[in-house]
Image (cartoon, helix red, strand yellow):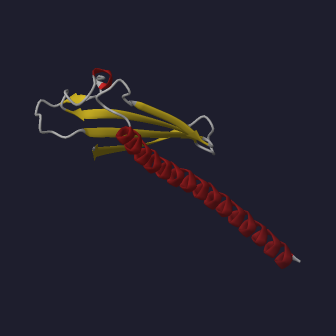
Amino acid sequence: MVTAIFVIVLMALVSVWILSLAGKMTKETTSQYMREQSELLAKSYTEYAILAVTANEQNTSKCLNDIAGTYKNYNIDVKISYIGNSAIIDSSCRTPNNYNVTDTDTPLNILVDVFVRYSDPDQSDRNVTYHRRTLQKI
């Protein structure tokens, strides 16, 4: 009788430990999924920003400085800074984040900063931000 009670208590402790371990693995998998998704969104929005900049004229007032978007629980903000000679870049593109180069042979470059924000699924009051910076020659 004592042996049976001991075995039942031991099995209960092992099952509680297994359930705890399964919960931790699920939590880590969810966190890893959210992190990977934010990296993929940042890469995708970087490519979109480069495509959008090449479609716009930098020497007119149609300068593109910001892109904002959402995907499910993710908020994406893209900041674009221009690096190049002021003769190629319109004055509306010249924000404090842009860099003027005096050399006339310098090609136009852009600095793309992508911020992907999402809330931590385990702690809803904690926000996570993934940042990706890319320098691209146009």
Location of the C terminus by quadrant is: top left
Left or right side of 43 for 72: right
Q: Residue furthest right?
A: 1
Quadrant in which residue 66 is drawn = top left
Residue beneath the point at 69% across and 64% down? 17
Query: Would residue 126 be found to the left or right of residue 83 on screen?
Result: right
Q: In the rendering, at what x and y percent does residue 65 appear?
A: 38, 30
Residue 34 position, x and y percent, is: 56, 51
Q: Quadrant of residue 62?
A: top left
Q: Nearer the viewer, residue 135 or 21?
A: 135
Q: Is residue 94 left or right of residue 75?
A: left
Compared with residue 98, is residue 118 higher up or lower down, i.e. above or below? below
Total marks in image: 0
For the point 48% across and 52% down, which residue is it?
Answer: 40
Quarter of the N terminus within the rendering: bottom right
* Residue 80, position as x, y percentages in the image: 36, 34
Q: Is residue 129 above or below residue 1?
A: above
Image side of residue 67 versus residue 20, left or right: left
Q: Residue at x 57, y 38 (%)?
A: 70
Q: Position of residue 77 (x, y in %)?
A: 47, 35
The residue closer to the viewer here, 37 or 20, is 37
